[in-house]
């Protein structure tokens, strides 16, 4: 089985300032995957469907300094993500693209 490397979409990245309250972030670009890069010092918790409220207890965690590639939900047309952290002003770079 051949696996394609992640290929970012043109102008498909945005930096999100994640805080201690759930927030929605519009994500530009088209693609079936999201690359989530936590540049902060605390874990960031995300929901990739853009609708479900993010929580520290139940959302997908991204550890500080880690980068994850996830499938964009529910389909490539999802307009954004929701995110929260336990510490204010955490930076999350989100890139749209295809491949893993």
Image (cartoon, rainbow, N blue to C red):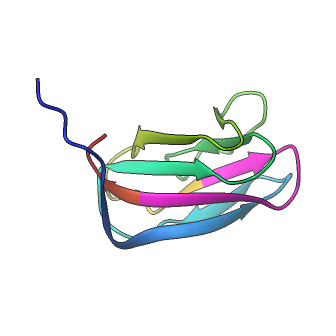
Q: Nearer the viewer, residue 98 or 51?
A: 98
Side of 8 relative to 84 (left or right): left
Among all residues in the image, which is located at the extreme bottom? 11
Q: Main secondary structure of the magenta part?
A: strand
Residue 22 falls within the magenta-colored stretch: no
When the figure is inspected, residue 31 is found, relative to residue 57, above or below; the finding is below
Q: Position of residue 89 (x, y in %)?
A: 83, 62
Quick one: quadrant of the C terminus?
Answer: top left
Depth check: give the residue in front, 42 or 50.
Answer: 42
Residue in the image at 50% along x and 40% along y: 68
Q: On the rendered structure, is 21 left or right of 63?
A: right
Residue segment shown in magenta = 82-95
What is the quadrant of residue 24 in the picture? bottom right
Q: Quadrant of residue 16?
A: bottom right
What residue is at 82 percent from the left and 57 percent from the top?
19
Q: Closest to the observer: 38 or 57?
A: 38
Residue 50 placed where, x, y %?
Answer: 54, 53
Question: Residue farthest to the left?
Answer: 1
Give left or right: position of 93 versus 20: left
Q: Position of residue 25 (x, y in %)?
A: 60, 64
Left/right placement of residue 93 relative to residue 65 reads: left
């Amino acid at each position: 089985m051949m696996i394609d490397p992640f290929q970012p979409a043109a102008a498909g990245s945005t930096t999100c300032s994640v805080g201690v309250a759930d927030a929605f972030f519009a994500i530009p670009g088209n693609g079936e995957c999201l690359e989530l890069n936590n540049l902060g010092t605390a874990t960031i918790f995300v929901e990739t469907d853009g609708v479900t409220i993010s929580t520290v207890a139940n959302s997908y965690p991204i550890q500080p300094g880690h980068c994850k590639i996830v499938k964009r939900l529910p389909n490539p047309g999802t307009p954004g993500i929701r995110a929260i952290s336990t510490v204010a002003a955490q930076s999350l770079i989100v890139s749209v693209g295809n491949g893993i």
